[in-house]
Amino acid sequence: MDRKRVNGPESSVPPLFKNRDKPAVVNEANKRADNRGIEDIRAIFLKTGLVTQANGSAYIEIGNTKVTCAVYGPRQLKKAGFSNQGTINCEFKFSTFSCQKRRNHMKDPQEKEFSLNLIQALSPAVRLDLLPKSAIDIYVNVLENDGTSSCLAAAIIAGSVALADAGIEMYDMVTACSSLFDDRHVFMDGTAEEEVVISKSLTLSYMPSLNEVTHILQSGQSDIAVTSQAIEQCIDGCSKIYSVMSNALLQSLSSS
């Protein structure tokens, strides 16, 4: 008997592994977990004037996704040199309790990326030429995350409505819609559970009155045909969301 070796058991069994098969996004009736169709978006609640100290603010719920936005300005830049164009500053932040895994208080790379995406999506719609040597500050806070791509879309919608609520002149309001897609289907307005199964996503920002796309963010590789289908469906979804944004602003005007 070799005392320097650890002898194994006389009888052994193969190890047991967890079932790693990903669940299906749709059932046999072609319905998703929340009983939506593939092309259906979740119900939206939108309200302005949430933050009374800000010049403009908005609160949006898309399913379980909850986002607040506050706009301050335009304010004059004292130290910077003269500029014919105004600037937009944005801060996107996930609350520490908004995700399944607790977020850090410090900004992570994803939040910095979303801050830049917000500036790129909203800047084409704002008349920055009328605000020389001025800055507009946009603060977005995610209270509950039910889909990362839907959080970015909700932040763009809330930011656009908050800018309009602040009385800042714009060419058009920017609406946004997100989608998940695989090799066969495009799922509109994906949830966090669906993002675990499908890693490819696309978020589109759109100005319906001008028929212009201001920003597209895609993650994952796909065929040109699938990407084109996702863009077309997101544009259709943006047109539906635009009426919700207009009604929210009209209600804020009637209440005031």
Image: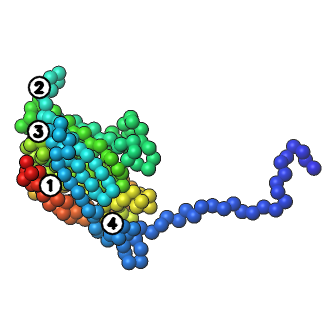
Q: Secondary structure at mark 1?
A: helix
For the residue carrying disc 3, how many other residues have a C-alpha within 10 Å: few (<14), some (14-19), or many (20+)?
many
Name the residue beneath numbered marker 2.
Answer: 82
The amino acid at mark 4 is Val
* Number of numbered discs overlaid on the protein picture: 4
The amino acid at mark 3 is Leu
Mark 3 and mark 1 residues within 8 Å of each other at the beta carbon: no
Name the residue beneath numbered marker 4.
Answer: 186
Name the residue furthest right.
1
For the residue carrying disc 1, how many other residues have a C-alpha within 10 Å: few (<14), some (14-19), or many (20+)?
some
Left or right: 189, with 246 as reference point: right
Label 1 or label 4, whichever comes before in sequence order: 4
Could you say which quadrant of the image residue 147 lies in? bottom left
| Residue 8 image offset from top left, x and y in percent | 82, 54
Label 4 or label 3, whichever comes before in sequence order: 3
The amino acid at mark 2 is Phe
Q: CA distance from mark 1 to mark 4?
A: 29 Å
Label 2 or label 4, whichever comes before in sequence order: 2
Q: CA distance from mark 2 to mark 4?
A: 47 Å
Q: Secondary structure at mark 3?
A: helix
Residue at coordinates 40% horizontally, 61% vertically from top-left? 194
Q: Is residue 26 above or below residue 153?
A: below
Left or right: 37, with 206 as reference point: right
Please give the label number shown on residue 128.
3
Left or right: 17, with 2 as reference point: left
Q: Nearer the viewer, mark 1 or mark 4?
A: 1
Q: CA distance from mark 2 to mark 3?
A: 14 Å
Name the residue beneath numbered marker 1.
Answer: 248
Q: CA distance from mark 2 to mark 1?
A: 36 Å
Label 2 or label 3, whichever comes before in sequence order: 2
